[in-house]
Amino acid sequence: MATSPTMRKLLTIVHQYACEPRLDDSDAAAERDLDYFDRILAILGVAPPDAGAPADTAGEYRVRWEIDLDAQSHLAAARRARDIQLAPDSHATVFDVVLRTDAGEPDWSQARQVDLTAHRTDQEVLDEIAHLFRTGEPATAEDLDYIGHLIQLTGRQVAVPAEPAGGGDQP
């Protein structure tokens, strides 16, 4: 099976990462992880995030998450909803958020819907990319597309690598 030059570079970085000793200092480990993440981004041709993006307004917010589910009681419904929120593979990541004012109850018509899957931290994206490479199976084109999507969710733009002369992958 032919492996693209991009995939070979990514696999080299993942192999280097896997061979490094575990760091006990969490700050040093995070710094190392971000360094590897930056190297992966460079291979994929990713531009840095837009530093000029407008920041949110600091203040007190009201956050709302809703779910409809069947349960035997109020307590059972609350527990089930909490279990759904905390599940590692949960899709319960969409919240309505409104800035509170002195006017009493917030105006929910002014709420913004925030999907946390679109606002993952670099560390969360790194963890998910690392999980893809730890499965033991060679990454597919679909995996690379997914990795590109994860990177875009961090706010970075993925540049499409130029095709090598002669087109296609080299064996």
Image (cartoon, rainbow, N blue to C red):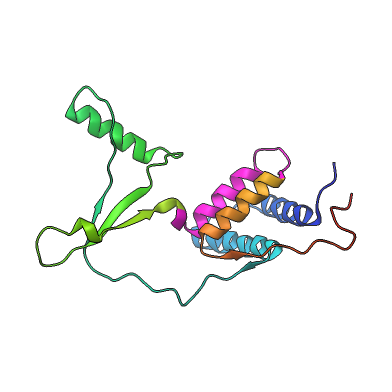
Q: Is residue 171 left or right of residue 113?
A: right
Task: Residue 50 in the image: state x and y as whole percent.
Answer: 51, 73
167 over 138 or under it: above or below: below
Q: Is residue 24 left or right of residue 76?
A: right
Viewer-proximal residue among 121 and 67: 67
Task: Residue 160 in the image: state x and y as whole percent.
Answer: 69, 62
Q: Is residue 126 left or right of residue 99?
A: right
Residue 25 seen in render: no
Q: Is residue 25 magenta?
A: no
Q: Is the N terminus in the top left, top right, bottom left or bottom right quadrant?
A: top right
Viewer-proximal residue among 83 and 159: 159
**Quadrant in which residue 6 is drawn:** bottom right
Residue 143 seen in render: yes
Residue at the extreme bottom of the image, as rendered = 52
Task: Residue 8 in the image: state x and y as whole percent.
Answer: 78, 53
* Residue found at x 11% / y 67%: 102
Viewer-proximal residue among 131 and 25: 131
What number of labels is visible? 0
* Residue found at x 64% / y 63%: 41
What type of secondary structure mainly makes up the magenta span?
helix
138 over 102 or under it: above or below: above
**Quadrant in which residue 38 is drawn:** bottom right
* Residue found at x 55% / y 59%: 152
Residue at the extreme front of the image, as rendered = 109
38 over 94 or under it: above or below: below
Task: Residue 159 in the image: state x and y as whole percent.
Answer: 66, 65
* Residue found at x 73% / y 63%: 161
**Quadrant in which residue 33 is drawn:** bottom right
Report the magenta residues as a range: 118-140
